[in-house]
């Protein structure tokens, strides 16, 4: 990603004297911001990525105002920004992009740095690995609880008995339904044979 080239497009749109061009400048600035944020922070949504990078931004409040202006531009039909709104938003986006590309990584905890590296290297796979690890730990904890505690043993016995009961009744119901279908089928055969004679 060539940030300088992409930001040059934003500047050209902003320098045009038309509100429609200013709106496009803000939309393009949001796009550049999102691409840059995606390289530095992690998370499934943009909100999560911003939250995980809050320590990086020098002026988060201005960035959030710029993002609100972007939201209005893409969701409100006919809305166009003023020159001042555009200038403020672009300054906030530019500062945020500078923060993301030149921040002091010591501001992040070692856990955040590890998560960033994991997410950037493996994408969603990192999230799945983390979820799998949590599931494995939960599974072994549940097995221990069921095997080593009296409540766990009672719960296991209850679940086994309930399963036997459900399967027993389901089997009974399925056999009953099959018998009814067979009776109906044989009735049709008998009636059909009676009508032909």
Image: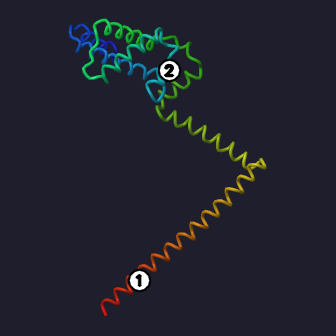
Name the residue that disc number 2 marks.
Answer: 51
In the picture, the quarter occupied by the N terminus is top left
Could you say which quadrant of the image residue 190 lies in? bottom left
Residue count near mark 1 (Cα–Cα under 10 Å), binned few <14, some 14–19, many ≥20: few
Name the residue that disc number 1 marks.
Answer: 187
Q: Nearer the viewer, residue 89 or 170?
A: 170
Q: Nearer the viewer, residue 50 or 41?
A: 50
In this rendering, would 40 be left or right of 80? right
Query: How far across and down, in percent of the image, does residue 36 sit?
Result: 40, 19
Q: Residue at x 39, y 10 (%)?
A: 92
Residue count near mark 2 (Cα–Cα under 10 Å), binned few <14, some 14–19, many ≥20: few
Element under label 1? helix
In the picture, the quarter occupied by the C terminus is bottom left
In this rendering, would 193 be left or right of 37? left
Q: Tell me, for residue 35, which label it has, or none.
A: none
Q: Residue at x 21, y 7 (%)?
A: 17
């Amino acid at each position: 990603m060539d940030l300088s080239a992409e930001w040059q497009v934003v500047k050209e749109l902003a320098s045009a004297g038309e509100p429609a061009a200013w709106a496009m400048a803000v939309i393009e600035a949001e796009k550049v911001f999102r691409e840059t944020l995606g390289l530095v922070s992690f998370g499934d949504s943009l909100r999560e990525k911003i939250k995980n990078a809050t320590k990086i931004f020098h002026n988060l409040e201005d960035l959030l105002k710029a993002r609100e202006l972007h939201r209005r531009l893409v969701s409100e039909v006919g809305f166009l920004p003023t020159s001042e709104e555009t200038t403020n938003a672009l300054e906030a986006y530019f500062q945020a992009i500078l923060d993301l590309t030149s921040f002091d990584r010591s501001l992040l905890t070692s856990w955040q740095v590890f998560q960033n590296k994991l997410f950037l290297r493996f994408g969603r796979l990192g999230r799945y690995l983390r979820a799998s690890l949590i599931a494995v730990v939960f599974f072994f904890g549940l097995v221990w609880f069921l095997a080593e505690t009296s409540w766990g043993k009672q719960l296991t016995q209850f679940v086994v008995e309930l399963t036997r009961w459900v399967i027993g009744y389901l089997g009974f119901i399925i056999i009953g339904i099959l018998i009814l279908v067979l009776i109906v089928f044989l009735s049709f055969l008998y009636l059909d044979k009676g009508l032909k004679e």
